[in-house]
């Protein structure tokens, strides 16, 4: 399924748990017409820059933009052999996993850096942070007494 309105371009894979649900008109459901279509390949394509550029060119509306099934009919989609689709999905899945792991590692690092920054600020403000160069500068510049 893809959102064709408001949260335009959001793609979700749904399973049997949504059987019988009635999506609103801003949702477009995709399903293969033949066994020669790998739906994971379709999902990656629907999230691609090539597809999203086509959506940008086709969408209409002022307050909430949208596109519909008639717009999809005019859009280009690659027709690749099943073997290519399977290989491409495997490659994109590996890249997505690598990206997610990198994103998670960076988020952890940012969180740790924010904690360290706060600890340094607290230590500096409370005088618990000993900075030798600053102490020597102060000793030489401040009048004794």
Image (spheres, rainbow, N blue to C red):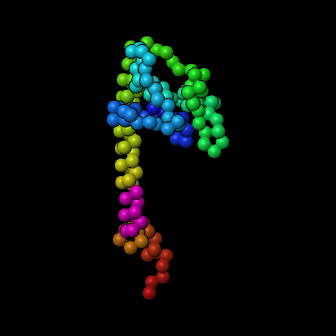
Up the image or down, 132 lies above or below 77; here it is below
Relative image position of residue 12 (x, y in whole percent) = 42, 34
The front one of 120 and 39 is: 39
Quadrant where the image shows the N terminus: top left
- Queried whether the magenta region covers residue 117, the answer comes back as yes
Q: Quadrant of residue 51?
A: top right
The front one of 70 and 7 is: 70
Please identify the residue farthest to the right as the structure is shown: 62
- The rendered magenta stretch, by its main secondary structure, is classed as helix
The front one of 114 and 28 is: 28
Relative image position of residue 134 (x, y in whole percent) = 44, 68
Please indicate, yes or no, whether residue 99 appears anywhere in the rendered image.
no
Up the image or down, 16 lies above or below 79; here it is below
The front one of 2 and 98 is: 2
Q: Which residues are magenta?
A: 114-123
Up the image or down, 107 lies above or below 47; here it is below
- Residue at 35% across / 71% down in the picture? 128
- Residue at 55% across / 42% down in the picture? 6
- Queried whether the magenta region covers residue 78, the answer comes back as no
Please identify the residue farthest to the bottom as the structure is shown: 145
Q: Quadrant of residue 145?
A: bottom left
Up the image or down, 114 lies above or below 12; here it is below
- Residue at 44% across / 36% down in the picture? 22
Relative image position of residue 105 (x, y in whole percent) = 36, 44
Q: Across the whole image, how many numbered discs are drawn on residues?
A: 0
Please indicate, yes or no, whether residue 52 appears anywhere in the rendered image.
yes
């Amino acid at each position: 399924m893809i959102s064709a309105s408001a949260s335009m371009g959001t793609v979700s894979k749904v399973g049997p748990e949504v059987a019988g649900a009635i999506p609103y008109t801003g949702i477009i459901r995709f399903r293969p017409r033949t066994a020669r279509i790998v739906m994971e390949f379709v999902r990656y394509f629907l999230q691609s820059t090539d597809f999203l550029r086509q959506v940008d060119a086709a969408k209409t509306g002022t307050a909430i933009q949208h596109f519909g099934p008639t717009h999809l009919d005019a859009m280009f989609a690659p027709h690749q052999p099943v073997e290519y689709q399977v290989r491409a999905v495997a490659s994109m899945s590996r890249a997505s996993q690598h990206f997610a792991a990198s994103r998670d590692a960076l988020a952890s690092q940012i969180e740790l850096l924010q904690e360290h920054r706060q600890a340094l600020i607290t230590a500096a403000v409370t005088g618990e942070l000993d900075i030798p160069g600053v102490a020597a500068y102060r000793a030489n510049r401040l009048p004794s007494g």
